[in-house]
Amino acid sequence: MGSRALRIGGYDVKRVLVDQGSGAEIMYPDLYRGLNLRPEDLDRYDSPLMGFDGGMVVPRGMIRLPVQVDDVEVSVNFIVVEVFSPYTAILARPWLHVMGAMPSTLHLKVKYPTQGRVGELVGDQATARKCLLLAITQWPPGIAVVTEDPIS
């Protein structure tokens, strides 16, 4: 049986989008506040990001935190943004690459090598539906969700 537990900064986290189309890991306000992070915990990050709607978002900063699935832990640079999202974070290509992971959106699973076997992170269909529904029905007008590569 696969793991449903994804830990960021030592805490179990839900509503994480694994997005192989994104080039940067993103942390949204719910997770930022939930981890009791403060502005002084953030490193400077000045590159604006582009949202789905083409709008620019200026990040609050960046923070490096451990992300753990079962016995595999890697450090991830999260860009912290103050925008609406039904997700708490996005894990993107950098995390997938370091993990050696293979995501399947169809099966809501991420498979990764660990200690001579294949580990499996299993998503929750009901939560995925709720996030999608929230994104479609409750989206505040003019607010961008950031999942694009940083602009050079």
Image (tube, rainbow, N blue to C red):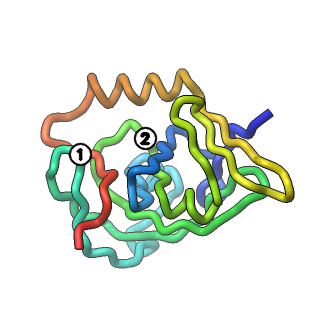
- Relative side of 18 to 69, left or right: left
Specify the quadrant of the image occupied by residue 134. top left
Relative to 46, is 123 above or below?
above
| Amino acid type, mark 1 | Phe
Q: Where residue 123 is drawn, which disc sits there?
A: none
Toward the viewer: 109 or 41? Answer: 109
Residue at horizontal 64%, vertical 52%?
Answer: 7
Say which element carries label 1.
loop
Q: Position of residue 93 (x, y in %)?
A: 48, 58
| Residue occupying the point 43% across, 46% down | 30
Specify the quadrant that holds the N terminus: top right
Residue denoted by label 2: 87
Q: Tell me if residue 133 comes above or below residue 10 in the rendering.
A: above
Q: Above or below — where is 26 with respect to 136?
A: below
Q: Secondary structure at mark 2?
A: loop
Q: CA distance from mark 1 to mark 2?
A: 14 Å
**What amino acid does circle 2 point to?**
Tyr
Q: Residue at x 54, y 21 (%)?
A: 126
